Image (tube, rainbow, N blue to C red):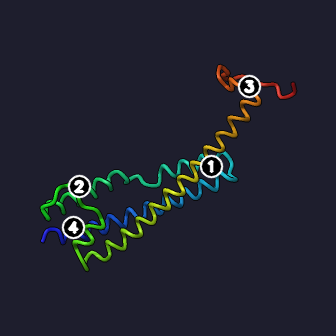
Amino acid sequence: MKEARLLPRLEAWAQEELGAQQALLRALEAHERSLGRGTPEEIETTVRAIGEVDPRGSARRGELDAILRELAAAWKLASGTLTLGSVAERFEERGARLARLRTELRRAVVEVRERSRRVALVSRQQCAIVSKVLETVLGKDGLEGIRGAVVDSRA
């Protein structure tokens, strides 16, 4: 039974994806903290850290697609019809670990999405504040046309 050997690969994929989502959540939490009270350098560091969290993301997605295609072929299903949940159900008792990983992964993805939205909101609010300050200081045109101007702070 070819599909039986695919179950451990799928479980390993889910475990790795769960780890990546948890790492991304930690990076987003650090970034949110830095937005609230960090220096510009700390904010830049946390932004960079978010980008470096999951270098295998697209490769891992390709691995999932390949495993699901193999399972679909083994079960004579149309490609693209399987999900982690449906695979776990088809494996019945042997799919219990995959079902648990799927639940944990779903929870982690929801947390990442919510944290990402909060970080985006804080970032937009800060951008609006900076824009308002620049408009107040420099006028409606802001920094347009100003390149490398030296300002005498004593004036």
Marks 4/1 in contact by CB < 8 Å: the verdict is: no
Query: 10 Å neighbourhood of mark 2: few (<14), some, or many (≥20)?
Result: few
Q: CA distance from mark 3 to mark 1?
A: 24 Å
**Helix or strand or loop: what does disc 3 sit on?**
loop
Query: 10 Å neighbourhood of mark 3: few (<14), some, or many (≥20)?
Result: few
- The amino acid type, in three-letter code, at marker 3 is Gly
Q: Position of residue 52 (x, y in %)?
A: 47, 51
Residue positioned 47% across, 55% down in the render: 53
Q: CA distance from mark 2 to mark 4?
A: 16 Å
**Helix or strand or loop: what does disc 4 sit on?**
helix
Q: CA distance from mark 4 to mark 1?
A: 43 Å
The circle drawn on residue 49 is none
- The amino acid type, in three-letter code, at marker 4 is Leu
Which label sits in the foreground, 4 or 3?
A: 3
Residue positioned 36% across, 68% down in the render: 102
Q: Which residue is mark 3?
A: 139
Viewer-proximal residue, 51 or 82? 82
Q: Which residue is mark 1?
A: 122
Residue positioned 13% across, 64% down in the render: 74
The circle drawn on residue 6 is 4
**Helix or strand or loop: what does disc 1 sit on?**
helix
Q: Which residue is mark 2?
A: 80
Decide which of tag 2 and tag 4 comes sooner along the chain.
4
Marks 3/1 in contact by CB < 8 Å: the verdict is: no
- The amino acid type, in three-letter code, at marker 1 is Val
